[in-house]
């Protein structure tokens, strides 16, 4: 059984134990049960809240400010959930790791995006979020003279899953709608305040004191590759190749491209030196590639038309002047086919208008008389053209090379477009002669510092920049499915910590370990509090957004000429709550149930 099943079994056993103790009257009076959730009630802390609530005018101003933010977020959340649910129904997306049911749970080790190595930071952020959220409700209760029946925490086994403040229902009912709304909005307001404070510290002095360590960061190695055979592994950092210093990921590719020898000596940050015997591994091949008959993913290409090849450079030189080539692999298989950029022609675009077939695939071999060996060269060649410019395109179609006169189209950005979908690699084949997957250490550090603009393009204005930075932080744990990266970033953990180092910032005196722990705490505290705030703003009971929705609906209905105010309010809040529930269920389970 996987971890998720074990967790469910553990919860079931725990629940049965709680029910047995409760049936025997063995649970203390201050402990209650709600399904598998234990609630611990207390009266302590009320005097402290009374003292803290003394500047009531100040707290009411804060409550009004928070209520306005909560209302805006409620409307945005309502619209977002509906739009997402409709999109899932109309065009069900293929199931991904992000839509797996266990990944909805914010439980490190169960949720595959939340590793156990950062469980302390996540739990700390959750504890802070629960305390400030329920503390906000309790404080605003006393500001608005609403009595508190009890306070406490809710736990699933030993895991705190919530905290609560129970207002006295009669006292709450006697308060006006404004007081009740401010009280219900206080929790999410505090969560958002903690988020802003945590991210301001993270974006500023903390990340400003961290730098990417020099070298090429290895996030993983390809099975069966040269790097795998040499014993390289995730977490290694290459600092030199053949005696040439390597300062970054890009520098590794540039350095290797200048070395023709099959054997290259690399030095790691640990001081270890090893020799890589390069071999050309097929890392990907599209099903429609003309070479699928004899070449598969994971195969090692040994020769092209009888010429031995071990590196990407040798491979590209071997196919440079050949429209058709025969590829040989280490396991003895061969395949013959056209060499160029594998593409699908889009209907009613430039290539289609010139006569290129829209059914099946074509292999483009040249543009304007310039040889094209792969998708990258096709893109680079088209970059030198302008929209509406005429050129000639040669492509392998139905067993022979055909020539087409094309008038190029244009994109919204002013780029010349051929009107095709292009598959990566040479004739749909991607190869790697070294075998490492590089970790985007600099990009992740930029996102962690709130600089989403450096990753997706310029974003103007300090407020827009901060909000976009917060959005980037939300995506980091799911970077492999939400951003163009192979890896996720859950903070500085054991295996990726060697890619970063303390720089000359204001907190560099903390050293690597101190900075990494502080960054992780701020990252997850802000992340958890932001998600708590958003979730509680969903306009559905028993969430805060549901209570605010009811108070707002009552305020509107009270001005209508009807004596069915209570029934109308119930109808509106119940309908919206059910819509939110269905939307959430569709977002979580829709891809599995509706796709395919």
Image (spheres, helix red, strand yellow):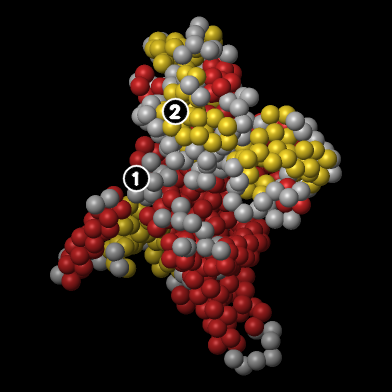
Give the alpha-carbon distance from disc 2 to disc 1, as whole Å.
44 Å
**Mark 2, secondary structure of its residue:** strand
Looking at the rendered image, the disc whose residue lies closer to the viewer, 2 or 1, is: 2
- In the displayed structure, would residue 163 be above or below residue 519? below
Q: Residue 136's x, y, as percent?
A: 52, 57
Q: Residues within 10 Å of mark 1 (few under 14, many from 20)?
A: some
Which mark sits nearer the N-terminus, 2 or 1? 1
Nearer-the-camera pick, 216 or 389: 389
Residue located farthest toward the top when viewing the structure as drawn: 243
- In the displayed structure, would residue 43 be above or below residue 460? below
Residue 253: mark: none
Q: Residues within 10 Å of mark 2 (few under 14, many from 20)?
A: many
In which quarter of the view is residue 72 placed? bottom right
Residue occupying the point 46% across, 14% down: 262
Residue occupying the point 43% across, 61% down: 592
Residue occupying the point 66% across, 79% down: 556
Residue occupying the point 31% across, 63% down: 37
Q: Residue 565's x, y, as percent?
A: 60, 87
Nearer-the-camera pick, 593 or 353: 353
Nearer-the-camera pick, 271 or 421: 421
Q: Residue 128's x, y, as percent?
A: 45, 47
- In the displayed structure, would residue 12 be above or below residue 111? below
Residue 328: mark: 2
- In the displayed structure, would residue 249 be above or below residue 380? above
Nearer-the-camera pick, 174 or 182: 182
Residue 109: mark: 1
Q: Is residue 399 left or right of residue 415?
A: left
Q: Is residue 313 left or right of residue 156?
A: right
Q: Residue 68's x, y, as percent?
A: 66, 61
Residue located farthest toward the bottom when viewing the structure as drawn: 563
**Mark 1, secondary structure of its residue:** loop
Question: How many numbered circles are shown?
Answer: 2
């Amino acid at each position: 059984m996987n971890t998720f099943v074990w967790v469910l079994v553990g919860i079931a056993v725990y629940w049965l134990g709680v029910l047995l103790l409760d049936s025997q009257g063995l649970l203390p009076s201050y402990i209650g049960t709600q399904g598998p959730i234990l609630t611990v009630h207390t009266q302590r802390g009320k005097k402290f809240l009374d003292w803290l609530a003394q500047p009531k005018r100040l707290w009411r101003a804060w409550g009004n400010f928070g209520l306005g933010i909560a209302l805006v977020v409620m409307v945005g959340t309502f619209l977002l959930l509906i739009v997402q649910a409709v999109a899932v129904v109309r065009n069900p997306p293929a199931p991904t790791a992000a839509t797996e049911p266990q990944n909805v749970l914010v439980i490190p080790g169960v949720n595959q995006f939340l590793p156990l190595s950062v469980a302390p930071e996540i739990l700390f952020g959750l504890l802070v979020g629960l305390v400030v959220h329920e503390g906000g409700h309790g404080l605003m209760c006393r500001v608005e003279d609403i009595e508190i029946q009890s306070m406490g925490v809710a736990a699933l086994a030993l895991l705190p899953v919530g905290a609560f403040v129970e207002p006295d229902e009669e006292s709450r009912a006697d308060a006006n709608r404004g007081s009740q709304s401010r009280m219900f909005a206080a929790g999410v307001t505090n969560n958002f305040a903690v988020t802003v404070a945590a991210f301001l510290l993270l974006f500023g002095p903390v990340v400003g004191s961290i730098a990417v360590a020099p070298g090429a960061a290895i996030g993983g190695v390809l099975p069966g590759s040269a790097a795998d055979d040499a014993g390289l592994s995730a977490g290694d950092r290459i600092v030199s190749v053949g005696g040439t210093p390597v300062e970054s990921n890009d520098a590794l590719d540039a350095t290797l491209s200048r070395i023709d020898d099959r054997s290259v000596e690399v030095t790691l940050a640990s001081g270890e030196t090893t020799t890589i015997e390069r071999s050309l591994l097929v890392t990907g091949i599209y099903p429609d590639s003309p070479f699928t008959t004899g070449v598969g993913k994971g195969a090692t290409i040994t020769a092209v038309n009888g010429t031995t090849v071990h590196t990407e450079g040798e491979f590209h030189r071997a196919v440079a002047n050949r429209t058709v080539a025969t590829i040989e692999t280490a396991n003895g298989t061969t395949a013959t086919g056209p060499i160029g950029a594998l593409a699908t022609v889009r209907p009613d675009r430039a290539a289609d208008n010139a006569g290129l077939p829209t059914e099946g695939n074509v292999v483009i071999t040249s543009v304007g008389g310039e040889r094209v060996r792969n998708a990258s060269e096709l893109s680079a060649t088209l970059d030198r053209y302008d929209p509406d410019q005429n050129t000639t395109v040669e492509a392998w179609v139905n067993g022979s090379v055909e020539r087409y006169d094309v008038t190029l189209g244009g994109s919204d950005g002013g780029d010349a477009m051929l009107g095709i979908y292009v598959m990566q690699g040479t004739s749909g084949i991607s190869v790697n002669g070294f075998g490492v997957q590089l970790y985007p250490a600099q990009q992740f550090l930029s996102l962690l510092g709130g600089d989403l603009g450096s990753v997706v393009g310029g974003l103007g204005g300090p407020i827009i920049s901060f909000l976009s930075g917060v959005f980037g932080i939300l995506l980091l744990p799911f970077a492999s499915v939400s951003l163009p990266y192979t890896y996720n970033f859950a903070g500085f953990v054991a295996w990726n910590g060697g890619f970063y180092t303390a720089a000359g910032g204001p907190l560099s005196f903390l050293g690597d370990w101190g900075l990494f722990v502080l960054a992780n705490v701020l990252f997850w505290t802000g992340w958890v509090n932001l998600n708590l705030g958003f979730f509680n703003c969903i306009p559905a009971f028993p969430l805060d957004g549901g209570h605010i929705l009811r108070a707002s609906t009552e305020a509107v209905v009270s001005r209508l000429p009807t004596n069915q105010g209570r029934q109308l309010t119930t109808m509106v809040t119940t309908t919206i709550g059910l819509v939110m529930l269905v939307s959430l269920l569709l977002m979580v389970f829709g891809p599995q149930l509706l796709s395919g």
